[in-house]
Every structure is written in C-alpha cells, then in structure tokens.
Image (tube, rainbow, N blue to C red):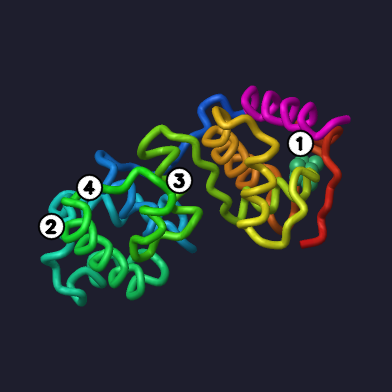
C-alpha cells in the first residue's frame, strides 16, 4: 500500500477512535498556553494543570511573569519537573515578548523558536493550538507511534517531523499530532504496546525496537 493511502487509513481509524483528540492543557489565552506548554516538558498534563490552576489566578500576562523574582516563580511551579530551568525560561521569555514583540507572541515557527524555552515541538504546538495554523509537533509519543507504524524512519524528532509533514496533508497536521499522542498514551504505550487491542494492527509494521 502506498504510504499516502496508508496514512489516510490510519488517520481515519484514529479519528473514529478518538473523535475528541485535542490538548488536555487548560488555558484561557495564547500566553497561558505558551506557559503551560513550556511547563509540560517531562511532566504530565495533569501535573501542569494542577500548577497552572493556581498560577493563572494571579499571574496571566508577560508583565506579571517578568516582574516576578526567580525564586518566587520557582516556588510557584515546583509541582512540575525541571522547575528551576523552566522558571528561568518563562521569565526570560516574558521579558523578550515585552521588549521585542510588544507583549505579543510571534505567529511563525522561526519567531517562536527564538523565545527561551521554546523548541520545535513547542513552536509547532503553539502554531497549531494557539493560532490554528498548520503545525505538527513531534513529542515522544508522536515519534514512537509513527516509527512503529512505519510512517517515519528518522532517529530524531526533527527528522520524523519532516517525514510526517511530507506525508500528511497540511490541514491534518495539528489533528495528527493529537491523534498520535492520544494513541500513544492509551494503546501504543512505550513499554508494552497493546497491539491485540489496537485498531491499527493490520496496518502496522510493528517496528518495536526503539
Ligand atoms: S499495532 Fe502495536 S505497535 Fe502498532 S500502533 Fe498498534 S499498538 Fe502500536
């Protein structure tokens, strides 16, 4: 089967399986989303939501975070992993937004990736979820699932992103990101994939070595 046909069948099956697939992060504004996505690295969405539920009651704008002292911010986000480096990045990112972008978040990959704490994955998520623009962020779930399925062969997330973007229509990039994450969390788990329960089993190459 041609890879284009295969990816269409895979996405259709996943859409039927997870019609509500989307971000689990809770936010009210693009800026809050950006803070939440930075906090989510190596932390679960529920950990992040617990932290931001309190954090965003008082701090909501770049100015609020720029004015915070670093130790105070570290204390406010210590419920997530790597909280010291994340605090440093969130403060520096807020300052840069104020000083270089008039407090607005850039709506392009290059501009986003110049912000402290923002790599390719976060930038793609911001485009897709924050701006409703084409973006396909590759996290550990997207990378693992697409390699097992045989849709990507790259060793790195960046290579996988290129391969997936070449294969998947632009209008489905954002949806695919969420579908692969949802499938990776629920069925195609890192240690023990539940292949016998998987709707994609017949289409999967089961490239299980990591
Ligand atoms: S068949 Fe197994 S390896 Fe393939 S996508 Fe499903 S759970 Fe993952």
Name the front one of labels 1 and 4. Answer: 4
Whether 23 is drawn above or below 56: the answer is: above
User: Which callout, 3 or 2, points at the residue further toward the start of the chain?
Assistant: 2
Q: Is residue 5 magenta?
A: yes
Q: Which mark is residue 25?
A: none
Q: Quadrant of residue 35?
A: bottom left
Question: Ligand 1 near label 1 (Cβ, under 8 Å)?
Answer: yes
Whether 107 is drawn above or below 112: the answer is: above
User: Which callout, 1 or 4, points at the residue further toward the start of the chain?
Assistant: 4
Contact between marks 3 and 2 (CB within 8 A): the answer is no
Q: Nearer the viewer, residue 72 or 91?
A: 91
Residue at x 83% of width, y 34% of height: 203
Q: How dense is the environment of label 3, judged by Cα within 10 Å: few (below 14), some, or many (20 and up)?
A: many
Q: Is residue 35 magenta?
A: no
For the C terminus, the image quarter is bottom right
Name the front one of labels 2 and 4. Answer: 4
Q: Which mark is residue 125?
A: 3
User: Which callout, 2 or 4, points at the residue further toward the start of the chain?
Assistant: 2
Residue wearing tag 4: 104
Residue wearing tag 1: 198
**How far across and how far down the image is residue 6, in percent?**
79, 30
Whether 180 is drawn above or below 113: the answer is: above
**How far across and how far down the image is residue 111, in percent?**
36, 53
CA–CA distance in space, label 2 to label 4? 11 Å
User: Which callout, 1 or 3, points at the residue further toward the start of the chain?
Assistant: 3
Q: Which residues are magenta?
A: 1-17
């Amino acid at each position: 089967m041609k890879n284009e046909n295969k990816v269409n069948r895979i996405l259709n099956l996943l859409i039927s399986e997870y019609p509500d697939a989307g971000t689990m992060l809770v936010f009210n504004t693009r800026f809050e989303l950006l803070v939440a996505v930075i906090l989510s690295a190596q932390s679960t969405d529920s950990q992040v939501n617990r932290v931001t539920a309190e954090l965003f009651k008082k701090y909501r704008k770049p100015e609020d975070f720029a004015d915070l002292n670093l130790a105070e911010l570290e204390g406010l986000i210590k419920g997530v992993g790597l909280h010291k480096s994340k605090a440093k990045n969130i403060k520096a990112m807020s300052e840069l937004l104020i000083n270089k972008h008039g407090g607005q978040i850039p709506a392009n990959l290059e501009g986003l990736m110049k912000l402290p704490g923002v790599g390719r994955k976060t930038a793609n998520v911001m485009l897709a979820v924050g701006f409703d623009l084409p973006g396909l962020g590759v996290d550990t779930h997207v990378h693992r699932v697409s390699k097992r399925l045989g849709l990507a062969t790259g060793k790195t997330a960046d290579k996988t992103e290129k391969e997936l973007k070449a294969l998947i229509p632009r209008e489905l990039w954002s949806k695919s990101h969420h579908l692969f994450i949802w499938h990776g969390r629920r069925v195609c788990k890192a240690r023990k994939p539940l292949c016998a329960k998987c709707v994609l089993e017949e289409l999967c190459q089961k490239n299980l070595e990591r």
